[in-house]
Image (cartoon, rainbow, N blue to C red):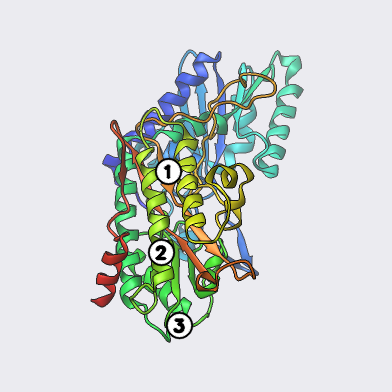
Amino acid sequence: MSIPAQDLTPFAARRRRVLDIMRARGGGIAILPTSRELVRNRDAEFPFRFDSDFFYLTGFPEPEAWLVLIAGAEDRSILFCRGKNLEREIWDGYRIGPDAAAGQFGFDRALPVEALADELPKLIADQPALFVPMGSDRLFDTHLRGWLDRVRAMGRSGATAPAGSYDLRAILAEMRLVKDAFEIETMRRAGAISADAHVRAMRASRPGLREYEIEAELLHEFRRHGSQSVAYNSIVATGHNACVLHYRAGDAELKDGDLMLIDAGCELDGYASDITRTFPVNGRFSGPQRALYDLVQEAQNAAAALTRPGARWNEGHDAAVRVLAQGMIDEGLLTGTLDGVLESQQYARFYMHRTGHWLGMDVHDVGDYREPGAAQSADEPRPWRTLRPGMVLTIEPGIYVRPAADVPERFWDIGIRIEDDAVVTESGCELISRGVPVAADEIEAIMRG
C-alpha cells in the first residue's frame, strides 16, 4: 500500500502527541514493531497486513519494521526497516529502504532492521521508562528481555535500565478512539465502497445461486474501487444460516422465499467498514419477514437517536433492546410484560449480542467501553463511556429465530440484522454507510431493478 506524501502529516502529528504524553510521564523510550509475515502453508504466506498501532503512527506499509520514539531533552523518531536488496526485490517487490524512508515518512533517522540488535540496547540505556506493547507478542517480549539484559550488563560502565514501564497500546487505544478528519474521510470512502458492494449483491441475488457467488460480487466491487482487502471475513448467509452470527460464506443455495443476510465491509488504506443488510432472495419480503424486519429497523432507529455527544455507550443498546423486546411480545415470540422480559433477559433467546462496537483501523476497534480510571466503588463498575464527536461505532440490532415447539412456525429460520457505521458529530451522528438502502420498500425496489 502506498500513501501519498501529502497525506503523511497526520502520522507525524500523532507521533508528536505520543511524545507529549511520554514527556508528561517523565520521558523515556517507546518501541513498537509492525506485524510479522505469517506462513500459510509450506512457502506460501498470508497477505501481509501491518500492525494497526504501528501504521497509525508511521504510515509505513512494509513488514520487518520497528518504530522507536525517544522523549527527552531532544525528541527523536527512528524507523528500523528492511534495507534495499535488488536481488530480493526481483522476487518480492520494491523496498523503500532506510535512506528514502527517513525523508519520505518524516523520521529523524532510519536504519536497517539488521542494526536493531546492536542499536536498541544503546537507545534503551539511561532512559527513565519504557513505553511498549505489554504482553501482546511473545517474540517481542523475548527481544525486549534480551535488550534489557544487555543494558544491565553495561552497569559497570554506569548505564542504567529503565525503572518504569507503561503499556503503549493503552495510550494508543485512547488516541485512536477519537478519529481525526483524515481518518473520518477515509472511513467515509470505505463506507461508500462497501455500500456499493451491498447494492451489487442485492441486485445479483436470485433463487438458484450459491452463497459463494454472492460473496464474489462483494469482492469484485471492493477491489474495483481500490480497496486493498476485506476488513473481516464476509458473512453471506441464506435461510437458516442467517441465524449463525459468524457464519462463513459457503455453498448453500439461495432459495425462493428465504432471506439473505450479508455482513461485509472492505478495508481502505488501513480503515475498516462494517455493514449488514438482510433482504429477500426473491425480492419480496413475506408478511412474517417484513414484521420482524421492520422491528429491527425500528430498534436501529432508536439506537441511532441516542448516538450523540453526551450520551453513554450503553444507552443506544438499551433503547434497541427495549424496542426488540416489546416487538417480540407483540409478535408472540415471548410472553409476559415488557419490564419482566427485560429484567429476566428473555429477549436474549432471539437477540444475544450487543448493538454495536467501536470501528476504525480494526473492525472491532480499540478503546475501553467504560470511562478510564478507578471504579466509583469496589462493588460498582466504572460508568459507561460518554460519546464524543469523532468517535465511530456500529449500530447493529438483530433478531434470530431458530425452530422450537414454543415459537410460531411462521418465524422459523428467520435471521435479520441491520448494521450501519456511525460517526458521532457535534449534534448527533452521521451514518456513513447509507449508500445502501435500509428501508424494506427501498430494498424491494432495488431488487426489482
Give the residue drawn at x 50%, y 27%. Answer: 69
Check the picture and name the quadrant holding the C terminus. Answer: bottom left
Q: Amino acid at mark 3?
A: Lys
Where is residue 389? Give x, y as percent. 35, 32
Quick one: 211 or 177, which is closer to the camera?
Answer: 211
Would you identify the image quadrant in which residue 151 lies? Answer: top right
**Res. 13 mark:** none
Give the residue drawn at x 58%, y 47%. Answer: 341
Classify 30 as above or below 50: above
Q: Residues within 10 Å of mark 1 (few under 14, many from 20)?
A: many
Q: Nearer the viewer, mark 2 or mark 1?
A: 2
Element at label 1: strand
Check the picture and name the quadrant holding the N terminus. Answer: bottom left
**Res. 255 mark:** 3
Where is residue 300? Give x, y as percent. 40, 50
Name the residue tied to disc 1. 393
Q: Residues within 10 Å of mark 2 (few under 14, many from 20)?
A: some
Element at label 2: helix
The answer for how far apart the CA atoms under marks 3 and 2 are is 20 Å
- N-term-proximal mark, 3 vs 2: 3
Would you identify the image quadrant in which residue 107 lies? Answer: top left
Where is residue 188? Give x, y as percent. 30, 48
Q: Nearer the viewer, mark 3 or mark 2?
A: 2
